[in-house]
Image (cartoon, rainbow, N blue to C red):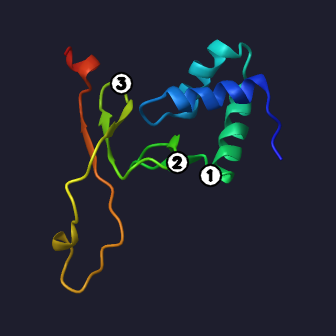
Amino acid sequence: MERNTKQRDAIRTVFEKSDRPLSPQEIHERADRAAPGLSLATVYRAVKGMLEDGSIVTVELPGQPPRYEPAGLDHHHHFQCRSCGKVFDIEGCPGRLDGLAPEGFVVESHEITLSGLCAGCAGG
């Protein structure tokens, strides 16, 4: 069983307050404010434990290292800024995409990632 420490509590709080998927480096930057001296290795260990206990899930984007977000969110998709690299949640889904698959194929799931410039990078 994982020990609760100030550092792990800080990491959990980061996920509770975040509105988008985070990289380990982003988790580290945010959690280090509440638990100065936090190591990146501790972030990776905490993320591993949180994945194992099911409190967070991995967000996979093609060609990118994984990011993480709280488990239990409604089905949604993501937007990745091509300038700053941040990933944002897009609420909702366009619906079933079975009609896009070739005849005879069975769609079991889908992920949609939009890319472009976030509001901060676009100057908006």
Give the mark, 3 or 2, whose residue is nearer the N terminus: 2
Left or right, 49 with respect to 83, comes to right
Residue 123's spot in the image, x, y percent?
20, 14
Mark 2, Cα crowd under 10 Å, few <14 / some 14-19 / many 20+, is some
- In terms of secondary structure, where does tag 1 sit? loop
Q: Which mark is residue 54?
A: 1
Residue located at (36% from left, 24% from top): 84
Separation of disc 2 and disc 1 at Cα? 7 Å
Q: Mark 3 belongs to which amino acid? A: Cys
- In terms of secondary structure, where does tag 3 sit? loop
Left or right, 60 with respect to 83, comes to right
Residue located at (63% from left, 13% from top): 33
Separation of disc 3 and disc 1 at Cα? 29 Å
Q: Mark 2 belongs to which amino acid? A: Ala
Separation of disc 3 and disc 2 at Cα? 25 Å
**45 above or below 106?**
above
Circles 3 and 2, Cβ within 8 Å, touching? The answer is: no
Circles 2 and 1, Cβ within 8 Å, touching? The answer is: yes
Per the image, the residue denoted by label 3 is 84
Give the mark, 2 or 1, whose residue is nearer the N terminus: 1
Residue 88's spot in the image, x, y percent?
35, 34
- Residue nearest the observer in this picture, 30 or 19: 19
Mark 1, Cα crowd under 10 Å, few <14 / some 14-19 / many 20+, is few
Q: Mark 1 belongs to which amino acid? A: Gly
Residue 26's spot in the image, x, y percent?
53, 26
Find residue 44 and report its image quarter.
Answer: top right
Circles 3 and 1, Cβ within 8 Å, touching? The answer is: no
